[in-house]
Image: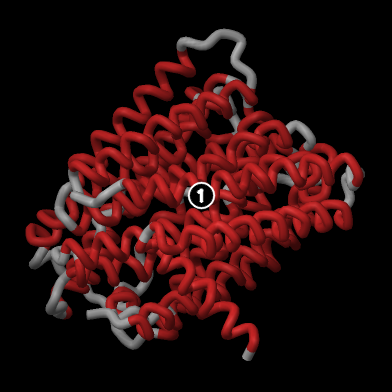
Amino acid sequence: MVDSHSFAHAYKWSLIQKWIIRFLGLISTLILVRLLSPEDFGIVALASLVIGFFDVLGSSGQIKYIIKKQEVTSEDLNCAWTLNLLIRCALTVVIFFSASLFANYLDEPKLTMVLQATCLILVIDSFKNIGLALDLKKMNFKSSTQISIAAKLISFVVTISCAFYLKSYWALIIGTITFKLCEVVGSYILHPYRPQLSLTKIAEQWLFSKWIFLTSISGFMRAKLDILLVGANIGIKETGLYSIAQEFSVLAQTEIIEPAMQPLYSVYSTIINVKEKLEEKVHQTIYLTYAFLIPCCFGVSILSEQITYVVLGEKWSDASGLMQLLPFLMLNFLTYGLFLTLSELKGKMKVSLIIDLIGMLMFIAVIYSSTNLTINDFALYRVSVAVIIYCLTLFCFNKILGISIKPIVLALVLPSICSAIMYLAISNSIEIFSNNNLINLMINIAIGFIVYSSCYVLAIVIFRKKSQILTYQHGVIMSLINRMKK
């Protein structure tokens, strides 16, 4: 059983890793968007899409296999490492010789050399020390955090230096390759395990990994399909705009909420067959995350123009329209991600595959049935499909996993009402603090925070006896207040 102390320790290191890497990433992006063009980011986004797809093809789920297996032997580790190495080396060869085909399909000749260079990422990453999976199994994120931070620091310096010198997309590519090289070297410095070639347990690993493999492919396509469709149907500049707008729109989910999800996999695995405890933990997770995420959706949407001008710069002004819509994807990302984790642990991954397939087919049908498609129309359709998938996911929570959705709906409604009040307050404050500068942006954010926090805490205090989960929320708030007094 994973106790709360172990989870807190794991979450702490996961959060440290995410925040430091994101801080460096944000600084890097803020510098790069002023040195490079949307077209440069578009080329890299399309290359990342292709490499990412093959990266998923090469994923055998070895990390989750090691984490879930009760007793792990050196043969398990060696087989997982070998399988990963062989698959990724083969895929690297495929990408190198088919790069021109992808470039022709996406109508971007520059992609040929870019793909031939970036495919090195796959083979480099395959040499990473599998021994780190043992640390993750024990919820020890310290070593992986240290490796990632060191690699990011080095690649940060390399990327910025190359950007100043080259002023092209090659700076991003060189930086990414540097990051992967540093990760591999660091994994052998900080972990004593030394993997060896072995295929003795390949059949056993494949029995576990085949559904993870399929859900990984469908999950990747679900997450990256929009980038592919923008590149193929609208243009390379719009691909860069969409890529950066989406990245900044969902920061709250990717950089604050996601770090908790990795430790939660181990937590849920210990109670997956205890219905009452699992349901209680899921409801608590959703309540806490929704209370933070929903106001972020509304806040980024209403402040999209100021955020775009202050953070990205004037040449990215077309991204502001996208950032009015894309933040609402966070709610679906979080909820579906939680469902995917639980369905994996319960061995019901077929359902998540079906949901992915439905979402992708719906989105493709909408896009290819549209005429005179603009990038803002595209974003609207993307969010609309996400809303439908969100509702379908809630249905599956109840029917497939047996988890009551009434508390989930309550977790959605209460923060949404408070966020709507916050939205109106910021709408009025923007008329006063309307100039696109950092001071006005910070004032509007502060106003939104004060209004939302006041409304939400007041609602919890008033309605705490109406629901067990609201009572839990009230306890969390009172605990935080008591800590602040000390």
Q: How many marks?
A: 1
Tell me residue 295's x, y (percent).
Answer: 60, 50
Q: In the shown orientation, is residue 473 left or right of residue 55?
A: right
Quarter where residue 54 is shown? top left
**Residue 17 seen by the camera:** yes
Residue at numbered disc 1? 414
Q: Residue at x 23, y 67 (%)?
A: 277
Q: Dot 1 surroundings within 10 Å: few (below 14), some, or many (20 or more)?
A: some
Q: Quadrant of the N terminus?
A: bottom left
- Residue that sits furthest to the bottom in the current view: 486
- What coloring was used for the rendering? secondary structure
In front of the other: 130 or 317? 317
In front of the other: 211 or 278? 278
Q: In the shown orientation, is residue 292 left or right of residue 133?
A: right
Q: Residue at x 48, y 18 (%)?
A: 367
Helix, strand or loop for disc 1: helix
Quarter where residue 230 is shown? top right
**Residue 177 seen by the camera:** no
Q: Quadrant of the C terminus?
A: bottom right
Q: Residue at x 21, y 40 (%)?
A: 351
Tell me residue 389's x, y (percent).
Answer: 37, 34
- Amino acid type at circle 1 is Leu
In front of the other: 421 or 375? 421
Tell me residue 325's x, y (percent).
Answer: 61, 34
Tell me residue 442's x, y (percent).
Answer: 81, 57
